[in-house]
Amino acid sequence: MNTALNLAIWLPLAGAVLIALLPSAERLARWIALVASGLVLGLAVGLALSFDRQAPAAQPQFITHLDWIRQLGASYFVGLDGLSLPLFVLNALLVFLAVLVSWKTQQRTRAYFALLLVVETAVAGVFSSWDLFLFFLFWELELAPMYLLIGIWGGERREYAAMKFILYTVGGSAFMLVGILLLYFNSPVKTFDMVAMGSQPYVGSLAGLIWLLVFVGFAVKVPIFPLHTWLPDAHTEAPTAISVLLAGILLKMGGYALLRVNFGLLPGATRQFATLLAVLAVVNIVYGALVAMRQSDLKRLIANSSISHMGYVILGASAAVAGGAAGAMAMQGAIFQMFSHGIITGLLFVMVGLVYDRAHTRQISALGGLAARMPFVAVGFVMAALASLGLPGMAGFAAEFLVFAGTFPVYGVATILAIGTIVLTAGYMLWLVERVFFGPQRPEWARLPDASRLEALTVAAFLIVIIGVGVYPRILGDILAPTAATLAARLAS
Amino acid sequence: MDLRLLGPEVALAVAASVIILADAFIPGGLSRRAMLSVAALGIAISAWAAISLGGSSASGFNGTIRADAFSLFFELLLLAGTLLVLLAAATLLEASPRYRAESVGLVLLATAALMLLASATELITIYLALETSSLSTAFLSAWNKKDLRSNEAGLKYFVLSAIASAVLLYGIALLYGLTGQTHLEGIRQLLEVPSKAPVLLAAAMLLAGFGFKISAVPFQMWTPDVYEGAPTPITAYLSVASKAAGFAVLVRVLQTTLPDTQIDWPLLVAIVAALTMTVGNLVAMAQSNIKRMLAYSSIAQAGYVLIGVAASRQGTGPVLFYLLGYTATNLGAFIAVIEIARRIGSEQMADFAGLYRRAPGLAFALAISLLSLAGLPPLVGFFGKLFLFWAAIQANLGWLVLIGVLNSAASLFYYAQVIHTMYLLPGEGEVSPEAPNLSTGSLVVAVGGIFALGIFSAPLLGLAITAAESLP
């Protein structure tokens, strides 16, 4: 029983219940949310510092394992390993920053912050569950609050975007549930305990079918072409803080689940489908970048760049089946990229939100020359854009380098195509910065204020993490390397 | 000794008589408070009597009644459901002073009959219990005497239930002709199956008779009209109590009399299950009245339960658990609808727009109930479906599970539509906030049950399986 981990999972939900029980606490709600998410962030950082980096990676740490539904072989089993810990911290960090970003929310404050906290518990649960059944429950718990967050506080087409989001995700979940049940009934160990399932993986004739069923559920979330069409709508219509969470952590749920369930529990089938994965990854990378290039809406552009960047995760993962040093490095890169993309895209959405809050338009053609009026926002935006295109010294570079170096010996052509896409990324990012912030000043934007102190602090927090991880990647690498190596080795054998 | 076995039913019948007679002879009638107090007292004594029998598997009245854990489970479920329905109706009873003693009394009598139905082990007794409950509910459906739709509901229920009873009687007669027995166990012992046709025909006729009670396709025709026309508390009662007892007798008769190794009734039930959930869900999508939508949804829910019935022995425990969760969930939905309709004066889903602002508590309760009906975790509806599918996979009914999963996913469409209307669409008008009353109290219990039964599903499933195993 690990108190800190359990507290970090359930504290946000307790905060949400507290907000719901205090009937007229519109102002208090944000403080409750801030304290709850701040405590969770502290706990998560504490867990990361006390994580034993030398321990064998086959077992999670900070374990709590309790009996739950014995008739089904389901238990309450939570813990963290090198794959889940970075994402667990990322969740705590981004939710805390999302509370700061939405500090000025006026509309239905109580419901907003309560739902935000429910999402935090759900995602923390997904990243820390070692029982497949529990994992599924947490996965579903995130759905309804997210639907409401997009649907109530979103932009003009919020109802359409929220409906599309929930229909895609529920459809994916149905496939996933059937896959999970099939896996349980055919697995030799007859349990949902993922440690036991992983140590004695199912290799029978249904492995391919099960792999595809759960893959559909996760691919919707990542998202992988052609299941990605909900993403531009949802990310664009969601309010700023929710876009940060959608891009920053909800997409990671898909990538994480792919590595944890498909790779961890069905290594044999993963080897069969590795090439397919690599092809889909390259399609994601190139297609996302091309679509991003010709967007006229600031937020839609960033949303599409997410599709492209999540492709690197899938590419690195697919190369891990080769095993050896290259496979381990590719896997490391995939996990690293999930963290980097989460924090970088989170910042990009914050910056877009800052611009939109002031100019009330997201049309790139309507903006221009903003740097003169809001230098701080311009600097933050440029830094985020540079991080996104993989500038050395920032988090994105460390991740992408690992992916490319690990993938090249395995899928040469795919790697070259992916590296080539960096040029496209640099193209649309720099072109975006140029059109929005530089060029002639426009009279209608002559009175825009720069970032407030709170906003500047939030942006600085993002930048510190991005540059910190970029300059000293071992802070993350040491945690995830043993797990990545174990995963890759198990795939190759 | 024998009479003790009827204790639970007698307690309710006495309470019903006291309420009706006292109301008739006391000048000015019985107050609502007194009426509900007597009813609650009767329910409490009845529950105490049932518990003190303790599922002893004692049999009495020449083997026509059996007090086993199975009947105890259903008796307690029915009593809890009845109590919640009566509390939910409290405010409505205040508003309509006429015939209210009769309505409370008839609800108690119907429950007594349903309890008898759940514990009867002889076909004639089953028939009598079924008729008593149907007659009471037919009158209750027509309770709004000046309302045409309510009259239509009562008449429709009466005529169609009479037809279903006739078919059931044919089935009973067939079994009697084959074995010379009306006791369920006697039938099983004497039933020789040289030619399967007459036995299968008898099984189909029993299924038709009980299928009416649980609104299984193709015997569901009455459901939407009666649900829409009857007063909403009665609709709630029909959808949970009447349905649960229908499943109790169906499971008991099928399990006790017909060996599934020789007669393939599970396949018959499986086909009915597939039809029932598909028809229910598809038609529910096209509804605009919330009570009609819930009527079709309750048809679909019966289809899910039939998956467990088709899974035979191993499905019985999950069936019981599902009915427990379904009772809490559907009561939550209907009580929320009672309160919402009373405040906004409409049962049209379109008028629920913006309810989130106007009545946040009721909107939340209805949303949670609908999500549980759709089977979203961590609510009890999810666990109930999971256990049913689980049993069906083990009974090699994978195809039926696939249909069930697809139906669940499709059903989210119309359940979410209501939530969408309440939470995302702008609405007009204000609803004046009201102090908590008995009705909202019962709503809190039901919604709390939706969460608690889901999270603590493991021990409850254990209880349900124990109850299921007490069947001979």
Image (cartoon, coloured by chain):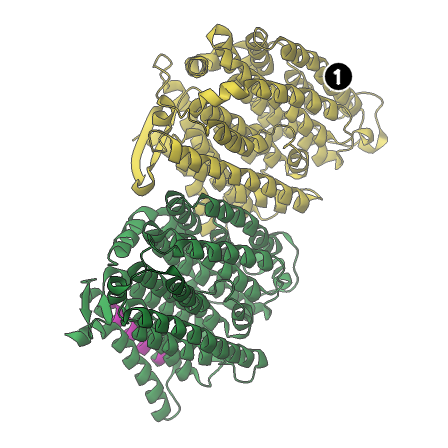
B109 with respect to B360 (left or right): left
Amino acid type, callout 1: Gly
| Residue at x-position 37% and y-position 78% | B132
The residue lying toward the viewer, choosing from A26 and A87, is A87
Where the C terminus of chain A falls, by quadrant? top left
A436 with respect to B243 (left or right): right
- The residue that label 1 is drawn on is A427
Taking the magenta stretch, the answer to whether it contains residue B229 is no
Position of residue B238 measured from the top left corner of the image (x, y, whole percent):
44, 69
> Which lettered chain is shown in green?
B
Place residue A480 in its image quadrant: top left
Above or below, B284 relative to B236: above
| Residue at x-position 18% and y-position 74% | B4
- Circle 1 Cα neighbour tier, 10 Å, few/some/many (<14 / 14–19 / ≥20): some
A331 with respect to A243 (left or right): left
Place residue B121 in its image quadrant: bottom left
Is residue B144 among the parts visible in the rendering?
yes
The residue lying toward the viewer, choosing from A197 and B219, is B219
Above or below, B125 relative to A213: below
> Which lettered chain is shown in yellow?
A
In magenta, the rendered stretch is B35-47
* Number of numbered labels in the structure image: 1
Taking the magenta stretch, the answer to whether it contains residue B39 is yes
Position of residue B134 measured from the top left corner of the image (x, y, whole percent):
41, 76
Kindly give the residue lying farthest to the left in the view shown. Answer: B1
Q: Secondary structure at mark 1?
A: helix
For mark 1, name the chain: A
